[in-house]
Image (cartoon, rainbow, N blue to C red):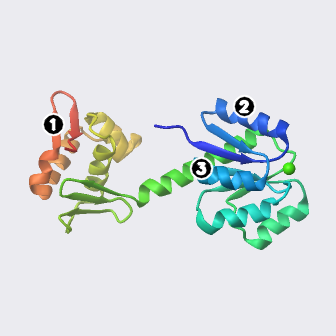
């Protein structure tokens, strides 16, 4: 998986350095701009997964930058504020910032907020997507399976099982792992691994020719063959 990129727009260079150092240590890539205009240019060029945006900036202030970003991008924005009035303004103007922290802040807190926002953003993105394999379309959000546009009725557990296998991208998953993922750790203690086999058998039947994509891996479990 590629590292997520964070764009920092802040003119206090020491603060940028501090955030950059700690974000990189936490596994992010970091690009930075010291004023609003170059920040917007970097945003277009680098397509970051999150923007840390200070309000007090030379030339364009953070409010203007935030508005400009929101005109054409949904990228999450974490605002940095130094004053109570700024905070009121962020909330009052409904600028579309996702979160804010007030200066002085602890770097740990900023990183925790950034992680929370990027996690939320990537979750909502995967949940929205459709997975297409052969004639099969899996609508993760609608909890629906389509074969050549026709809906197939799977039980909730069957759906979760298929989703888990598909998301493993061809890797084989053991029956125990599938029990943990689909039935949950606690339940999986009390359920026989044959439950997985029974669900797979039913799923294969319902999926018809596409059901052969769910392959048995000897002495282990199952894998989903994408092509
Ligand atoms: Ca500043």
Residue drawn at point x = 56 percent, y = 42 percent: 4
Which residue is labeled 2 in the image? 21
Residue at disc 2, secondary structure:
helix
Cβ–Cβ under 8 Å for marks 2 and 1: no
Residue 70 appears left or right of 149: right
Q: Quadrant of residue 144?
A: bottom left
Q: Could you give the CA–CA distance between mark 1 and mark 3, rounded to whole angstroms?
A: 45 Å
Which is more N-terminal, label 3 or label 1? 3
- Viewer-side label of 2, 3: 3
The C terminus is located in which quarter?
top left
Q: Tell me if I can see residue 141 in this picture.
A: yes
Residue at disc 3, secondary structure:
helix
At which x and y percent is residue 30?
65, 39
Cβ–Cβ under 8 Å for marks 2 and 3: no
Q: Tell me if I can see residue 49 in this picture.
A: no
In front of the other: 88 or 179:
88
Residue 14 appears left or right of 166: right
Question: Is disc 2's CB within 8 Å of ligand 1?
Answer: no
Residue drawn at point x = 22 percent, y = 34 percent: 221
Which residue is labeled 1 in the image? 216
Residue at disc 1, secondary structure:
strand
Tell me if residue 65 comes above or below residue 215 in the rendering: below
Which residue is labeled 3 in the image? 45
At which x and y percent is residue 28?
61, 37
| The residue positioned farthest toward the bottom in the image shown | 93
């Amino acid at each position: 998986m590629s590292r997520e990129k964070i764009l920092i727009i802040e003119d206090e260079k020491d603060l940028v350095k501090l955030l950059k150092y700690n974000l990189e240590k936490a596994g992010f890539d970091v690009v930075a701009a010291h004023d609003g205009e170059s920040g917007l240019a970097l945003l277009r060029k680098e397509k970051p997964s999150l923007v840390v945006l200070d309000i007090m900036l030379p030339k364009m202030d953070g409010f203007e930058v935030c508005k400009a970003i929101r005109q054409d991008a949904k990228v999450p924005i974490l605002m940095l504020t130094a004053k109570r009035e700024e905070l009121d303004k962020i909330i009052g103007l409904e600028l579309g910032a996702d979160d804010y922290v007030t200066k002085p802040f602890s770097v740990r807190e900023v990183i925790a907020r950034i992680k929370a926002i990027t996690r939320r953003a990537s979750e909502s993105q995967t949940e929205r997507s459709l997975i297409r394999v052969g004639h099969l379309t899996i609508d993760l959000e609608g909890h629906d399976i389509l074969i050549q546009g026709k809906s197939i009725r799977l039980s909730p557990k069957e759906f979760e099982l298929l989703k888990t296998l598909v998301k493993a991208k061809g890797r084989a998953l053991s029956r125990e792992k599938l029990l943990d993922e689909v039935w949950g750790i606690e339940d999986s203690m009390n359920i026989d691994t044959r439950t997985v086999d029974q669900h797979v058998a039913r799923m294969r039947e319902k999926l018809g020719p596409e059901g052969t994509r769910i392959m048995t891996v000897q002495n282990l479990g199952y894998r989903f063959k994408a092509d």
